[in-house]
Amino acid sequence: MRNFGILTALIVASCGQSKAPARPLPHGDGGQVASCEPAAEKAAILYKQAAFDEGLAPNLHADFTEANVHMVMVDCRANPEAVVRCVSKATSVAQLESRCLAPLDDAGEAEGRYFSTR
């Protein structure tokens, strides 16, 4: 058991001595996240403006923007070309959500139809 503790300590110590900088792991499916970056950037601009326009408390702007950009990225991963093209033309959150993203509703019926076709 004592040897296990020594071995664990050596492994942990050697992991911290890497000279190469840590690189983030790629996300999603291949290059789709990279191809969705323009949509994410445009969506972030629109959602930041919407948070300001709606009078959302400043400490909530980042969370609001991040959650909504995540929603855009989920749809973008499903159809990168169409979503990026559509989001690039959007001039408001209302346009972006109504024209570029899968519809949402309180009962979840639209999402069910959307995902049943996948």
Image (cartoon, rainbow, N blue to C red):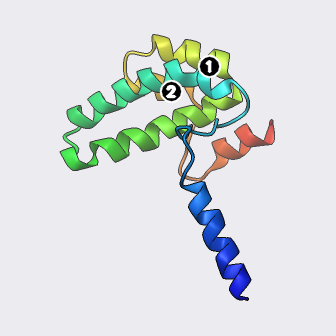
Q: Which mark is nearer the camera, 2 or 1?
A: 1
Q: Which mark is residue 74?
A: none
Q: Residue furthest right?
A: 117
Q: Who is closer to the viewer here, 89 or 35?
A: 35
- Which quadrant of the figure has residue 90? top left
Q: Is residue 102 above or below residue 63?
A: above
What is the x, y in percent for residue 3?
72, 82
Q: Which mark is residue 35?
A: 1
What is the x, y in percent for residue 40?
48, 26
- Which quadrant of the figure has residue 78? top right
Is residue 115 left or right of 52 when viewed as pictured?
right
Residue at left offset 51%, top offset 39%: 70
* Alpha-carbon span between mark 2 and mark 1: 21 Å
Q: Who is closer to the viewer here, 38 or 114?
A: 38
Q: Residues within 10 Å of mark 2 (few under 14, many from 20)?
A: few
Q: Who is closer to the viewer here, 65 or 55?
A: 65
Residue at left offset 66%, top offset 80%: 5
Q: Which residue does the numbered mark 2 point to in the structure image?
A: 98
What is the x, y in percent for residue 13?
57, 62
What is the x, y in percent for residue 11?
65, 64
* Residue type, mark 2 in image: Ser
Residue at left offset 60%, top offset 64%: 12
Q: Residues within 10 Å of mark 1 (few under 14, many from 20)?
A: some
